[in-house]
Image: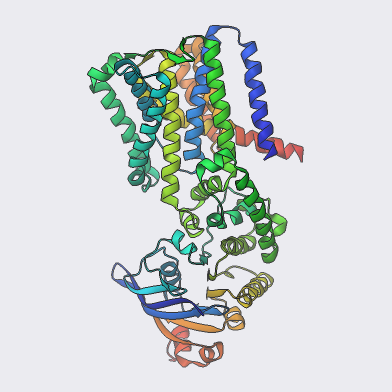
Amino acid sequence: MSGDTYRVAGLILALIAAYFVIPDAFVMDLWIRIMLISVVVIGLNLLFGYTGQISLGHAGFIGIGSYGSAIMTAHLQIHPVLGLLAMAVATGFFAYLIARPILSLKGHHLAMATLGIGVIVTIVLNNETAWTGGSDGLVVEPLRLFGGPIYDGGQWYVIAAGMLVVVVWGALNLVRSPAGRALRAIHGSEIAAQVAGIDVSALKVRIFALSAILASVVGSLEAHYLGFISPGTAGFGRSILLMTMVVVGGMGSVFGSILGAAILLLLPQVLAAVSVWETAAFGIVLVATMIFMPRGLVPTIGSLVRRRAR
Amino acid sequence: MIALRTHGISKGFGGVLAVQNVTLNVQIGTVHSVIGPNGAGKTTLINLISGIYRPDAGRIELFGTDVTGHAPERLVGHGLSRTFQNIKIFNEMTVLENVLVGAHQRLNTSILAGMLNLPSIWKADKEVTEEAEALLETVGIADVRHADASQISYGHLKRLEIARALASHPKLLLLDEPAAGLNASETANIASVVKGLSENGLGILLVEHDMSLVMAISDRISVLDQGKTLMEGTPDEVRADPRVIKAYLGEPA
């Protein structure tokens, strides 16, 4: 318990320190995007890393949040914050509805079904051109808080960091709580979990909905932050990227989610100089992680440190 | 008082009747064993009683309530708990956490309450943790409580299964071959734990191949053969019955 308090305090200090050493708008933008996507990855890690339920369509929920917020603020003149909340509720409800039939599937079947959800969202975004602008994308109004619009990177940094801290704190609490133990138990053995008294299907549905809500909220924020969205935001490639972030950072690790997000967003920047080889280097990093650290970076390093300490 | 009553339950798998018309009563405070040759339907019977399979026919009552066809997680509320023959432990959790999962229904398991870390959550958790440590003490594996469950020995896992099953405060415990693969001293430990539980008023349904264990701690024994109840009686009656010997060893040549 106190260990988690120190970790959250450490995160807050690190985020504050980072704010003051960020050299320019370019790096600031990168950090904001890392923090935003980290929230999605933490949600996906709760679903995949902790509970063992794969989803290859989570970018679809980001897309629903993004487009929902964009459309509501532009066409219905709804306040961005209200739009964000409305989309969070709507996405949660949608995820809850589709989750029960989907999550009764296992392994490859679950992967295919969630992949299908993501693909359907992308198709709708591409084809409902009257609302979404189709493949041309959509201009989104800025976020408004305390009366004024927010364009400034520094303000966005505070918003994204604040949300990240709250989500990290909640996730760390959750995984230690009875509900979190039940999630990990489902990962271990669904039959044994049921026999222990866990309503496995209900819990799977709830954690799926929670992870979808986090994706939707990030989608809404991201749309206002970027000011422009296109169907790629919900695409299959992005869903895969999210899963990769979970796996590289560490399945069943909240802080691993942040590290995974950071590495996979920073990698293209680092590799920009050798752009032809970018994809190849990307693949090498992934394969190397899987071979040498199959549990992901943070859990592997964590147990190394613990072994040294002994 | 009757903890468990099955009325003529049957279950078939693609034309093979694994369990046929089995009726048995387990009293609280007793050990009722089910024995029989391999393929007699013992594990299927336990899977039927614990809600993993639904019976094709017949009725199951727990403490007088009809629970036929209830999902496993609902049966916990009726006082049922079980262990598995082929160990089903939560590998990526510690030994202690495994036992805590057994107490699931006695805790606030709301996701929101967990995320907010409400005081009621960690207070209840502290109490249950102390109790779980006592359970690990009872089954004799308290020294490995902080180890990952994937790291402990087979004998420890078998006992962890029992500790986890007890964490829900069951009134009826189904044990599916708790001594399989254990050495003599580990088996003796299991025997004394099981006997102690029944003396404390728990009803126990025991499936086991270790005959000396069965004969030593059972109050009643049902013998299954090819899915049917061959006979039921005290250990002495079972030992003396020629039908039992025939079921195990075949006809004399």
The answer, for residue B193, to whether it is visible in the render is yes
The answer to which of A78 and A124 lies nearer the viewer is A78
**Residue at the far top in the pictured view:** A24
Percent position of residue B119, x then y = 63, 44
Q: Is residue A238 above or below residue A21?
A: below
- Please state the total of marks drawn on the protein image: 0
Q: Is residue A231 above or below residue A167?
A: above
**Residue at the far front in the pictured view:** A147
Q: Where, quadrant-wise, is the C terminus of chain B in this rendering?
A: bottom left
Left or right: B124 as drawn, with respect to A95: right
Percent position of residue A102, x then y = 34, 43
Left or right: A237 as drawn, with respect to A277: left
Which residue is rendered at x = 59% and y = 39% of the image? A173
Left or right: A251 as drawn, with respect to A242: right
The answer to which of B75 and B162 lies nearer the viewer is B75
Percent position of residue A278, x then y = 47, 17
The answer, for residue A270, to whether it is visible in the render is no
Q: Is residue B25 above or below residue B15?
A: below
Q: Is residue A227 above or below residue B17?
A: above
